[in-house]
Amino acid sequence: MSETPVAFMIATFVVLAAFFVVDLFVIGRKPHVPSTKECLQHIAFFVVAALIFGGIMWAVAGAKPAVEFYSGWLTEYSLSVDNLFVFVIIMSNFAVPKVLQKYVLSVGITVALVLRGIFILIGAALIERFTWIFFLFGAFLIVTAVKLVTGGDDDEEYHENGIIKALRKVMRISDEYDGEKLRTVKDGVRYFTPMLVVFLAIGTTDVMFAFDSIPAIFGLTKDPFIVFTSNVFALLGLQQLYFLLGALLDKLVYLPLGLSVVLGFIGIKLIMEALHGNSLPFLNGGQPVAWVPEVPTWLSLAVIIVSLGGASLASVLKMRSLEAGGGQDVAKAE
């Protein structure tokens, strides 16, 4: 059950809906390649907006929901960085013109948010009825954490999902773009442009990532409103991160390690919560396991900040060390 006032939730949805309408139909109608300055300004704006939103939530709903939002936002934001690798590959595979990529990301992320919203509602309903599902969520996150450390989850190539493959079989899709249009006419025959496929590729692929991130945030909060808004604020800055980081993404060498710590911690936390509300007849006689300690919300936030902050700092230091070593090698060669 949400601790956030209904009026605040309604106002939030109205403001967010207005933002996406403006982004898609006003800003999106002026395709361009964002400059570094523009990217930095937008990222700063969305980070400050998330901090302010959490502060307002603290004022209207209390400290606990606010801390849960900050924890969820940081986790989702960090996990969303992985999306950028796939976005780069999708844009390359479909040869999306650079000038159209910002618009493509805007639409793709909007589609992703709608699909994530449905996924969140389903997840919330399942958790409400079947508390044992936390055992599955927790185990899944721990396995994902291990894969991040061992590299078993790496995939350098983008593979079309079933929706895109089915679409190609039943619809005429041209090989060329026609600006931002979804339909075009070629030799008197109407075709869908590749833009439609790219929208769906980004939107549906992002939802695949949600299978990692949604269980993770449900380990931090049970409030569907906080889960959704954490996802919204995390995805809002992805466009600018895409253009700003681009080729620098592979420099964050220790980020997977930091993410693995966060996912592993949340996975263990989920299993502990499942034990607290246990109803499985073959476990402790179907009774809750009282001796398992509860993990406070502030500890979750601390683990997330230390893990991700430490991984980012270590990555920067590693990158500088490599660059310094490379400069010395060049000097010796001369």
Image: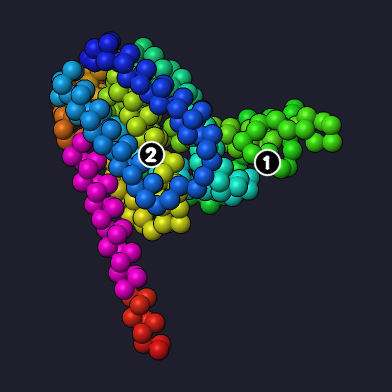
Residue 14 occupies which quadrant of the picture? top left
Residue 251 occupies which quadrant of the picture? bottom left
Question: Could you say which disc has been placed on residue 237 in the image?
Answer: 2
- Dot 1 crowding, Cα within 10 Å, few <14, some 14–19, many 20+: some
Q: Quadrant of the N terminus?
A: top left
Q: Is residue 309 left or right of residue 91?
A: left
Q: Residue at x 18, y 17 (%)?
A: 60
Q: Residue at x 69, y 35 (%)?
A: 193
Question: Does residue 207 belong to the magenta stretch?
Answer: no
Task: Find the magenta span and give its range.
Answer: 301-324
Residue denoted by label 1: 177
Q: Residue at x 64, y 39 (%)?
A: 179
Asked which secondary structure carries label 2, the reply is loop
Vertical position of residue 15 compared to residue 205: above or below: above
Vertical position of residue 278 compared to residue 254: above or below: above
Q: Quadrant of the C terminus?
A: bottom left
Instruction: Compare marks 1 and 2 and give the one earlier in the sequence.
Output: 1
Vertical position of residue 90 compared to residue 57: above or below: below
Amino acid at circle 1? Tyr
Q: Nearer the viewer, residue 158 or 132?
A: 158
Q: Nearer the viewer, residue 276 or 101?
A: 101
Q: Position of residue 48 (x, y in %)?
A: 26, 37
